[in-house]
Image: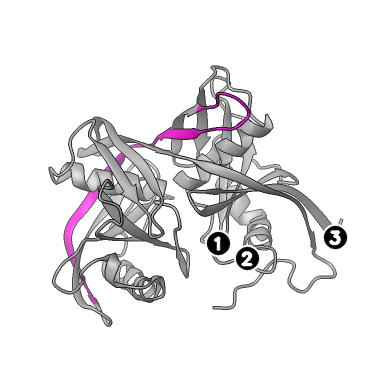
Amino acid sequence: MPIHTFKCIDAHTCGNPVRLVVEGGPELQGKTMEEKRQHFLKKYDWVRTGLMFEPRGHDMMSGSILYPPHDPKNDGSILFIETSGCLPMCGHGTIGTMTIALEEGLIQPKVKGKVNLETPAGLVEISYSQPQDKVEWVRITNVKSYLAAQNLTVESSFLGALKFDVAFGGNFYAIVDPQSNFSGVQDFSAGELIQFSQEFRKRINEKYPDAFVHPENPAINGVTHMLWTGNPLNETSSSRNAVFYGDKAIDRSPCGTGTSARMAQLFTRGKLKLGEEFIHESYIGSTFVGKVERETTLDNKVAIIPSIQGWAKVYGRNTITIDTDDDPYAHGFQVI
């Protein structure tokens, strides 16, 4: 059939979009969600680009597809589809997807208030509050997160030499803290940060090829995200960030995997304590509440098990068609 139909529910997590495909997602092969992710990328990536890129999506669009669990003890599994690709893990996407799935009855948790969700990056434990119809909040206990490298340097043609750390929180992040050549996100527009990030991320991966590979999953490799920090807008927040992902996106939410990476960096550097509340602020001012739940190790490195709590709001339902025979833009496009 040349016309493919997808029924979707749209929401946003603290400002960043989530489009859950509830009907029309492809059947995938694999014994784990990572294997299914690889099958999707080889055979069905046109679904991602068709639903996330223009004209059916936009530069910041993010989505997901739910699948049955591989282990019957768990409640479900998830594939993340975004303009930036199929991420191993997405915090804001998980919070938004769980909010939709619980409110719409798409997932029936074995234990009320708890969901065990299989992601390509590993098993994620979820708790939530749903006193009536609406989900008030979702808390993710994320995969092991760790500081992979400290005090690296790359030259920026815009800012000069910049020091940065690299941390993993589900994806690899280059974290740039305020320093002599970078005063903080509060002094730059989103457009400027996107321009800085495009060049800086490329130079990082050119200078440090093959330096960042997950020790348990080699398919997760390379710096894919930039996290620029700075002064918070609200005095009750711990820190503010602007997370760059894809080719030209600044996360409107505080970013769940970014918050995990940030906490791993701060904990390892002795700037965040076990169990201490970490209120992470996004570029637009929305917040996640993070916490280092426990200390662990990964590949002989200090690692943490972080939790991230946030909220999401459902705002739309739609049926999207992709006509692969007739529409020259069936697989989507990007302009800038």
Mark 2: amino acid: Phe
Please give the residue where the numbered disc 2 appears in the rendered image.
Answer: 53
Is label 1 in contact with label 2 (beta carbons under 8 Å)?
Answer: yes
Can you say which quadrant of the picture contains the N terminus?
A: bottom right
The image quadrant of residue 158 is bottom left
Q: Secondary structure at mark 2?
A: loop
Q: Nearer the viewer, residue 113 or 297?
A: 113
Mark 3: amino acid: Pro
Up-down: is 163 above or below 259?
below
User: Magenta region, mostly helix, strand or loop?
Assistant: strand
Please give the residue where the numbered disc 3 appears in the rendered image.
Answer: 2
Mark closer to the chain start, 1 or 3: 3
Tell me the distance, in whole angstroms, between the alpha carbons under discs 1 and 2.
Answer: 6 Å
Mark closer to the chain start, 3 or 2: 3
Query: Measured from the top left, where is residue 38 in percent x and y?
Result: 56, 49
Mark closer to the chain start, 1 or 2: 2
Crowding near the residue tagged with mark 2, few <14, some 14–19, many ≥20 C-alpha atoms within 10 Å: many
Q: Which residues are magenta?
A: 129-155
Query: Measured from the top left, where is residue 302 in percent x and y?
Result: 20, 38
Disc sitting over residue 83 in the figure: 1
- In the rendered structure, does residue 131 fall within the stretch colored magenta? yes
Residue at horizontal 67%, vertical 58%? Answer: 51
Residue at horizontal 84%, vertical 67%? Answer: 325
The reply, left or right, for residue 328 in relation to residue 227 is right
Q: Nearer the viewer, residue 201 or 300?
A: 201
